[in-house]
Amino acid sequence: MTRRDSLKVYWLGHACFLIEGQGVKIITDPYDPSIGYPMFDVAADIVTESHQHFDHNAHGYVKGNPQIVSTPGHHKFERVEIVGYETYHDDAQGKHRGKNIVFRMVVDGVSVVHMGDIGEVIDGVSEKLKPVDVLMIPVGGHFTVDAREAKEIVDTIEPRIVIPMHYKTEHLKFVGIAPVEEFLALFDEHEIAENPFTVPSDLEDYAKKLVVFRTIFRTR
């Protein structure tokens, strides 16, 4: 078994994922349960927060006394290296919703990029993110880029695997956010994945493969 075979991605809802590698667990953008998704019961070593809105910074609910990464720049840990790039939460240089951090992390040799609540079609940052094995990108619009803008970012970054997030579901109470189907319609095909999703050991044959979770992962 290669190191890559061990990397698992759990979607807990919204923009929150549990990335589990060998000896390390990372939670991205933990949400407050008031948004509608069920409360998660999970421990982590590291929590990344793209910005300080309540649906992305609720690390108080994460068990295990994790280290919090909520700033741009390099963050090096024993089993993972994380780099944060400053972007904007809107298309007006942050005038409406402030700044956002895009995190690129390397876990078990796999490069994972979490776009947070990106609200702009980024240019300069895109090249710094490459190469990208797994891209987690918001697609619902209203608060973030919409489906077409997300597709434009995907085409620029050219990740091997694309995982959409931050879209309307039966759980989410937010209004104005589109369902994932609008994003799926821009691709020829997609895979409905079980939760968790195990990142394949051989990614060389993958190119912008779209993976959508069948349902959220329930921890309780």
Image (cartoon, grey):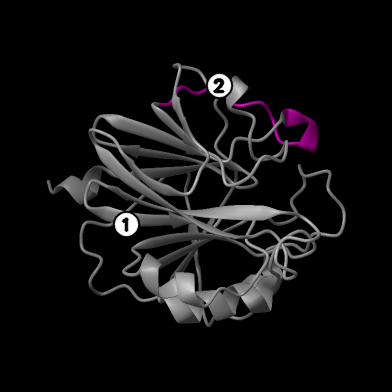
Taking the spot 24% from the left edge, 35% from the top edge, the residue there is 22
Task: Report if the CB atoms under discs 1 and 2 are less than 8 Å apart.
Answer: no
Q: Nearer the viewer, mark 1 or mark 2?
A: 1
Q: What segment is highlighted magenta in the picture?
A: 33-44
Residue 90 appears in which quarter of the rendering?
bottom right
Amino acid type indicated by mark 1: Ser
Q: Position of residue 179 (x, y in %)?
A: 74, 62
Tell me the quarter of the picture where residue 86 sits. bottom right
The answer to if 37 sits in the magenta stretch is yes
| N-terminal label among 1 and 2 | 2
Quadrant location of residue 204? bottom left
Q: Secondary structure at mark 2?
A: loop
Q: Residue visible at 61% across and 75% down? A: 121
Q: What main secondary structure does the magenta stretch of the protein show? A: loop
Whole-percent x, y for residue 24 in the image: 31, 31
Q: Position of residue 81 (x, y in %)?
A: 30, 45
Q: Identify residue for label 2.
A: 41
Residue at the farthest left position: 1
Q: Amino acid at mark 2?
A: Asp
The residue lying at 61 percent from left, 21 percent from top is: 60
Q: Which residue is more in the foreground, 173 or 64?
A: 64
Spot occupied by residue 56 in the image (x, y as percentages of width and height) = 65, 40
Q: Is residue 154 magenta?
A: no
User: Which sits in the foreground, 146 or 198?
Assistant: 146
Q: Name the residue furthest top.
A: 64
Alpha carbon of mark 1 to alpha carbon of mark 2: how far? 26 Å
List the residue tagged with mark 1.
111
Label 2 crowd bin: few (<14), some (14–19), many (20+), radius 10 Å: few
Counting labels gives 2
Q: Residue furthest toward the right? A: 175
The quarter in which the C terminus is drawn is: top right
